[in-house]
Image (spheres, rainbow, N blue to C red):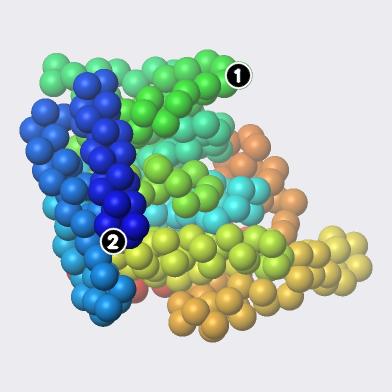
Amino acid sequence: MRRAAGALTSALGIAIFQRSCVRGTISQRLQPRWVEAVNAFYSVRFQSSNTKDGVLQDKRIKIMARGLPKQKPIEGVKQVLLVASGKGGVGKSTTAVNVALALAVNEPTKAVGLLDADVYGPSIPKMMNLKGNPEVTSKNLMRPLVNYGIACMSMGFLVEETAPIVWRGLMVMSAIEKLLRQVDWHQLDYLVIDMPPGTGDIQLSISQNIPVAGAVIVSTPQDLALLDAHKGAEMFRKVNVPVLGLIQNMSVFQCPKCKHETHIFGADGVKKLAKNIGIDILGDIPLHVHIRETSDVGKPIVISQPQSSVAQAYLKIAAEIVKRLSLFPI
């Protein structure tokens, strides 16, 4: 029975991949390797239960690794930093923008770029006060739009501001590939990528296709957000991307009149998570109206209010990130 099930499942797996080959979703060059990988994977999957689990796991990893793409650096980019979150609405894009600006402020001689990988909900154009279509070079590469000294690229530059992106997975992955490979970044010391929320195709594709220096997870202290932040951290660990630390966003609200502090989303939840999973906490960002106001008008707080306590918090976080990047050389 087990052997028959294994043969049937293997046949189904190969059939699926053959259909993909016919449709062109798997290149001709990789077709034999994929079929071999599927065959071998399912033969291992249904081996006798007497075989040790550890041996099976090792075989599966080696087999499936044959079909994985080789990591290829982005031309001109020295280090890639991912700013991610398990859940949407925790201030990830605002954090990514201000961290990119803080990196440039802390190290004026370094060139910093910002890539908006959130294809369905691009925020970088508005927060960086950028509009227009990128110019195209003679090599058919898009030139990033620049403001505040940061080179930026986003899907938002290529579509109307109010136009929804109603695409299936393959189209999204093609767009991500173009944003990664068909942009003239010139020479960058840091490329900050604002990731979409969650742990889906885009996260896996970027993690597996380019060398990533490290990832930062943004979360509020709320229990629901922490559950997804934990998943995000574990995903990066599984794809061998160093998790540099967690950022606790919207950590506390201070009344502008009486100065009373309220932990609207809970107190120190991210710090507790960091301790439980053995990851550093990079810093706290309060819930402050100036962060929202400056982001909405395209003048991020690190630039428009550099002496404020909030801007200083972003600068400290950027310094912590650089310190940890040096511990994980690519």
Q: Quadrant of the C terminus?
A: bottom left
Percent of width and height locating residue 32: 10, 38
- Three-letter residue code for mark 1: Thr
* Residue that mark 1 sits on: 162
Q: Residue furthest front?
A: 1
At numbered mark 1, what does the secondary structure look like: helix, strand or loop? Answer: loop
Q: Vertically, is 42 above or below 312?
A: above
Res. 46 mark: 2
Q: In the image, what residue occupies the spot 55% across and 72% down? A: 283
> Which callout, 1 or 2, points at the residue further toward the start of the chain?
2
Q: Vertically, is 38 above or below 142?
A: below
Q: Can residue 174 be seen from the camera position used here?
A: yes
Disc 1/disc 2 C-alpha distance (Å): 50 Å
Q: In the image, what residue occupies the spot 32% across and 46% down? A: 9
Q: Quadrant of residue 237?
A: bottom left
Q: Work out whether residue 119 or residue 302 is closer to the camera in this orientation and state it.
A: 119
